[in-house]
Amino acid sequence: MKKNVIIFLMMMFTIITYSQKEKNGTIYKEHPAINAVENMMQALFVEGDSTKAGSYLAADFRSFSGNSTNPDAKGRDRSWFLGAAAWFKKNIAYVSLERSPGAYPDALQYKDDDDGDEGLWVQTWDHFKGVHKVTGVKLDMPIHRMFKLNKENKIRLMFTYDNDRPWIENGQSFVERENGTLYNHHEYINKVRRMVHAYANNDMEVAYSFYADNVRFRNIHMPAGQSLTLEESKAQDVKFKENFTITSIDIRGYPDYLHYEIRNSKVVQSWWNVRLIRKADDKKLVVPLFFIHDFNDEGMITQETAYFSAQMLEN
């Protein structure tokens, strides 16, 4: 009996699942509407030709930002939108708009539509690149757009979904803005100096005491995204001192402590000459070293980034 109930329920689930499927149109990989959409975008954003771009737009065209949270947004009209062609041509260099790798547009012909336009939509996945000629802000982002076309194959609606952060950064770059305070004397500078000199004098317990437990270590020779833990860095320190004797670490210029307003970041930058003797051949070396140390709110170092020439250590 139990087995029969299970079979019955499986049959009912299958029937319900199939009954919920209903075709509502056709998806096209190639379609005149796709050509119209891509030609319009090239004319507007790449060629800066408003006349050509306008030939693909309906008289009642409106464009909307998919990032907008305004429920009363009315969109931009045809005149405003075509004005963007002149703006792009004047302000953006090295412009390109290409299909995203592995992607292609779709034309969707819906059976049911409530505005008499036969429900024809085109969706695109592109990658936009450019550099603003004044601010130097790089625009490099994927863009997804949805277009609604009428019976004359003219674009009536456009919805754009993109990363608006580069555009915000570009807009803010026209005005000078302070972003915190720069110090040449500060408690965190003192900590970096004490840490470096403790290391130079082989006082490793004191040197490591300035680091947070979750500190990460990076240097210019590591692949992007790679870092070491405190224990891994300690192991590297042992190997380094097996091969080199530190005679002195001398500061060059003076360190800077930067307390950034954005994200409340706390960073010390310092420049050093590391004087070494290579044990293999007793060769004396002077290796320039640039440090960036990030601090947390408790005044502990959470990240150390080192810039130096590995080649100088080998030659």
Image (cartoon, rainbow, N blue to C red):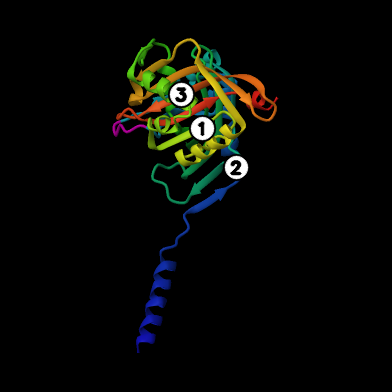
Q: Which image quadrant is residue 164 in?
A: top left
> Is mark 1 in CB contact (under 8 Å) with mark 2?
no
The region drawn magenta spans: 68-72
Horizontal placement of 225 versus 94: left or right?
left
Q: Position of residue 46 (x, y in %)?
A: 58, 23
In magenta stretch: residue 97: no
* Disc 1 element: strand
The earlier-in-sequence mark between 1 and 3 is 3
Q: CA distance from mark 1 to mark 2?
A: 51 Å
Dot 3, crowdedness within 10 Å: few (<14), some or many (≥20)? many
**Which is more toward the observer, 179 or 222?**
222
* Nearer-the-camera pick, 1 or 149: 1
Which secondary structure is most common in the magenta stretch?
loop
**Mark 2 highlights which residue?**
31
Tell me the residue that label 1 is attached to. 218
Q: Nearer the viewer, residue 18 or 310?
A: 310
Q: Quadrant of residue 169?
A: top left
Q: Amino acid at mark 1?
A: Arg
Q: What residue sits right under mark 3 in the picture?
A: 196
Mark 2 or mark 3: name the one nearer the start of the chain: 2
